[in-house]
Image (cartoon, rainbow, N blue to C red):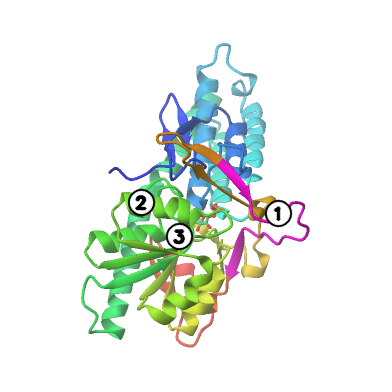
Amino acid sequence: MAPLISIKSSDEKLEIVNQLLLPHKTEFIEINSVEDAHDAIKTMKLTSPKKIRGAPAIASLAALSLSQHVRRSLAASPPPAFLESRDALKTHIDGILAFLFTARPTAVNLGAATKRLGKTLDAGIAAGKDPRTIAQELIAEGNAVADEDVGRNKEMAKWAGEWLLQRVREQAPGTPAGDLNVLTVCNTGSLATSGYGTALGMITYLHETGKLQKAYYTQTTPYHQGSRLTALELQTLKIPSVMICDTMVGSLFQHHNIHAVVVGADRIARNGDTANKIGTYNAAVLAARHKIPFIVVAPISTVDLDVADGSQIPIEQRPALEACLVRGILYPNEGKSEQVQVMITPSGLEGVYNPSFDVTPAELITAIVTEKGVAVKAEGATTFDLTPIV
Ligand code: MRU
């Protein structure tokens, strides 16, 4: 079966997979404006099918929606006023980029993409180019943000996989090839990126090279990115896998031979502190207790050198309701499926804590892997120097 995809883009159409119907049904929804893209990134509404998640996929959709907007504007008759002068173009595009930037706070890839497009705009203006030429450059740059993702994911997946193999060879030389067991959190595969994935990319690489025995993944409550999306991706790729509840990580480490925990990231601070899906920190604490290497795999655009440490990373708080509901499909009759949401708390529950992400301190992270290579801490250090890989 072909790998799953989160975004389909052509000159005619921009579409995202309706992640709320996954894993039961694959259906694409059109994104027709930057407002649609903003809504899809921001709302994650239980009732809204327009929803995209995963740091690189969020950045790709934002960039592609700008490309779509500019492409349609160039083809419009009469052309919109903002294409008539460089000043008008700058005001218009800066406004859109600022709007897209506000869609979700924690994943820095979105900011990296909007900054990159802003640079293309400013360079064209500074060079005194015609507004239509700058518009064409913006389309190309927006497409490049999404296109580059797959290639770099394959690179970081290989770096991470080879690093782990080397480490296992050194520290547990008796481990037979093909015997690696790895735990991951959340969903970091094709559905969270433009393809292949970051942490799930490493798992895929180990499987493709015959080194993986099993991938374990947490359900990742309350949004269930693990049980809905990672489960489907691993099944589609025919990677042997086992789902665990979020509360079972400690038990897994006590009773099974796990060679690594591998996760993605939404933002990596200058010192290596890493924000990722809620529950990542729990897994890191337990991994340290069990001396299991903890690996972060993410593109360079996830490293935010402007942020000194994890305390400065903004953490998105999700609506209380998201933690009070589970969503799924009822199969009342064969061939018929009905989406349902079930309340699992007393209604009107006050006091729900629902941060979308947590921060794993650098001290608990063994390696940070980007498309440029692997960073580890210097002997005795508790933080990373990420400059060589940024
Ligand atoms: O709230 P989400 O589903 O967007 O959170 C996603 C994660 O935390 C991922 O681990 C991260 O974005 C990396 S995706 C390659």
**Residue at x-position 61% and y-position 18%:** 80
Magenta-highlighted residues:
340-359
**Residue at x-position 52% and y-position 24%:** 132
Q: Residues within 10 Å of mark 1 (few under 14, many from 20)?
A: some
By secondary structure, the bulk of the magenta-drawn segment is best described as: loop
Q: Is residue 61 visible?
A: yes
Determine the secondary structure under disc 1.
Answer: loop
Q: Nearer the viewer, residue 215 or 270?
A: 215
* Looking at the image, residue 324 lies above or below residue 103: below
When asked about the image quadrant of residue 176, the answer is: bottom left
Q: Which amino acid, mark 1? A: Ala
Q: Which amino acid, mark 3? A: Ala
Residue 315 spot, x, y in % from top left: 66, 60
Q: Nearer the viewer, residue 168 or 342?
A: 342
Q: Is residue 160 left or right of residue 211?
A: right
| Disc marking residue 196 | 2
**Residue at x-position 45% and y-position 57%:** 299
Q: Residues within 10 Å of mark 2 (few under 14, many from 20)?
A: many
Q: Which amino acid, mark 2? A: Tyr
The verdict on label 2 being within 8 Å of ligand 1 is no
* Residue identifier under label 1: 320
Residue 360 spot, x, y in % from top left: 56, 71
Say which of marks 2 and 3 sits in front.
2
The verdict on label 3 being within 8 Å of ligand 1 is yes
Q: Residues within 10 Å of mark 3 (few under 14, many from 20)?
A: many
* Residue identifier under label 3: 298
Residue 292 spot, x, y in % from top left: 42, 79
Cα separation, mark 2 vs mark 3, equals 12 Å
